[in-house]
């Protein structure tokens, strides 16, 4: 029996890799195929009368590991330089404003129809407001550089800021200057801790000569995250700063003190660490979506009571996104379609306390919103012509690419 389980698991992971490998060609988000594959496995086990253990308690912990690795992966991709100031600013402020407006709109709709407190409604609304970097970033592999870079920044900011926003709302009963000040104090404490631990972990990365060096670093990152969570500190700040530091390590060569940590050696190790992080993140993400797909009941997908709400939420999401792109002066094609919901949405939903949960916001609604947004993204990308020229770029971002090209011509 154990051999059968191992064979089945290896086969599923290889299929997950195949989905990820072909998603840029087929334009079908791998998450849809993973959820479908997990659901098919469930139907097979039911048909054959195979009884597997209850995975409901495993899913949140697996999702937390996925969250850590996704934020780390996203922050490692964020390149900080003067030529990208406009891109970073637009994506950051666009993410903050759209998330706040969208959460307030959805929360007020919940409040109007269900008469729960606005705090509870906001807690239930926030998971729908976060763009999934785990789905969006891989889906833009065939897009031009500016589209891909904007998606990396926007979805990474959405993951990080969305979780921080959700944490702030759930940790405070009231929202006053005192509560904002206390949360800001926690962020400052976490920034201080992050600075010390980032320098320490970077030093270890450059000094460890043992052939096993990346796995202990990942374990230490997870350990620091969980210890920070015990003391109610915004632990994602540490993940973000650590990833940004390593992702932009070559820019420290202008500082004399930085040469003490052997930048040339560290830079090589960072490239290897990135590859290790990407592969580990892929495994955790694939397992999470397979497991979540396995736990999906057919009735949840076809739930007629929640589908109307799911369609309504999706319409609001894309209507406000179109407005955001318009106000930002960005072209809507294909950015409008790049707003999928995914792992973070599921994880935040699972972390809502039963006493704070609105009956409407159930697993059916979450699944339907994720599937609909993924299908819209898939359809939009299929009908978007991908030309490797600047005509396809958002007009306000064209100068960024032009500036990069001019830079490469300099001796």
Image (cartoon, helix red, strand yellow):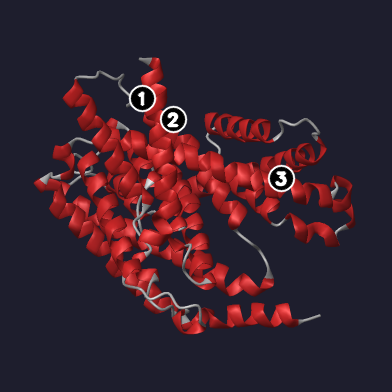
Residue 67: horizontal and vertical position, in percent?
48, 41
Q: Is 118 on the left or on the right of 309, as rendered? A: right
Crowd tier of the residue under label 3, counting other residues whose Cα lies within 10 Å: few below 14, some 14–19, many 20 or above: some
Circle number at residue 57: 1
Which residue is depicted at the point 40% across and 42% down?
A: 16
Q: Quick one: SS at disc 3?
A: helix
Which residue is depicted at the point 80% across and 41% down?
A: 206
Q: Quick one: SS at disc 1?
A: loop
Question: As rendered, which of 158 and 100 lies closer to the eye?
Answer: 158
Are the two marked residues, 2 and 3, in contact with CB atoms closer than 8 angstroms? no
Q: CA distance from mark 1 to mark 2?
A: 8 Å
Q: CA distance from mark 3 to mark 1?
A: 34 Å
Q: Is 81 on the left or on the right of 293, as rendered? A: right
Q: Quick one: SS at disc 2?
A: helix
Question: As rendered, which of 318 and 229 lies closer to the eye?
Answer: 318
Residue 361: horizontal and vertical position, in percent?
23, 43
Q: Quadrant of the image for the C terminus?
A: bottom right
Question: As rendered, which of 50 and 271 lies closer to the eye?
Answer: 50
Circle number at residue 391: none
Residue 78: horizontal and vertical position, in percent?
60, 59
Q: Is 404 on the left or on the right of 232, as rendered? A: right
Question: As rendered, which of 121 and 215 lies closer to the eye?
Answer: 215
Question: Hey, which residue is sitting farthest left in the picture?
Answer: 304
Are the two marked residues, 3 and 1, in contact with CB atoms closer than 8 angstroms? no
Circle number at residue 61: 2
Q: Is 365 on the left or on the right of 285, as rendered? A: left
Are the two marked residues, 1 and 2, in contact with CB atoms closer than 8 angstroms? yes
Work out whether mark 2 precedes mark 3 in sequence or the reverse, and give the earlier one: 2
Circle number at residue 195: 3
Crowd tier of the residue under label 1, counting other residues whose Cα lies within 10 Å: few below 14, some 14–19, many 20 or above: few
Against 281, is 50 above or below? Answer: above
């Amino acid at each position: 029996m154990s051999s059968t389980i191992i064979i089945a698991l290896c086969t599923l992971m290889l299929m997950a890799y195949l989905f990820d490998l072909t998603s840029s060609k087929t334009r079908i988000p791998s998450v849809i195929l993973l959820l479908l594959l997990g659901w098919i496995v469930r139907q097979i086990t039911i048909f054959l009368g195979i009884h597997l253990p209850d995975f409901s308690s495993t899913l949140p912990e697996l999702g937390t590991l996925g969250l850590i690795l996704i934020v780390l992966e996203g922050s490692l991709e964020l390149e900080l330089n003067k030529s990208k100031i406009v891109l970073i600013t637009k994506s950051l402020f666009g993410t903050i404003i759209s998330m706040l407006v969208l959460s307030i709109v959805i929360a007020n709709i919940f409040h109007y129809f269900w008469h729960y407190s606005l705090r509870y409604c906001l807690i239930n609304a926030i998971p729908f407001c976060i763009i999934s970097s785990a789905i969006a970033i891989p889906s833009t592999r065939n897009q031009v550089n500016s589209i891909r870079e904007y998606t990396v920044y926007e979805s990474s900011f959405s993951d990080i800021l969305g979780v921080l926003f959700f944490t702030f709302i759930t940790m405070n009963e009231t929202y006053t200057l005192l509560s904002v000040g206390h949360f800001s104090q926690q962020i400052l404490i976490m920034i201080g801790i992050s600075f010390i631990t980032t320098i320490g972990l970077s030093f270890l990365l450059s000094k460890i000569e043992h052939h096993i060096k990346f796995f202990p670093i990942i374990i230490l990152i997870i350990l620091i995250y969980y210890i920070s969570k015990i003391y109610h500190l915004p632990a994602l700040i540490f993940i973000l700063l650590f990833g940004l530091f390593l992702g932009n390590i070559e820019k420290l060569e202008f500082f004399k003190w930085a040469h003490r940590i052997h930048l040339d050696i560290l830079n090589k190790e960072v490239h290897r660490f990135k590859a290790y992080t990407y592969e580990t993140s892929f495994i955790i993400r694939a397992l999470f979506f397979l497991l979540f797909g396995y736990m999906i009941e057919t009735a949840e997908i076809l739930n007629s009571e929640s589908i109307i709400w799911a369609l309504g939420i999706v319409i609001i999401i894309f209507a406000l996104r179109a407005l955001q792109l318009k106000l930002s002066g960005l072209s809507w094609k294909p950015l409008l379609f790049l707003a999928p919901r995914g792992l973070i949405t599921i994880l935040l939903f699972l972390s809502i306390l039963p006493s704070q949960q609105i009956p409407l916001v159930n697993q059916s609604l979450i699944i339907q919103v994720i599937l609909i947004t993924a299908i819209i993204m898939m359809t939009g990308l299929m009908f978007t012509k991908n030309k490797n020229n600047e005509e396809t770029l958002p007009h306000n971002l064209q100068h960024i690419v032009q500036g990069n090209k001019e830079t490469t011509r300099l001796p």
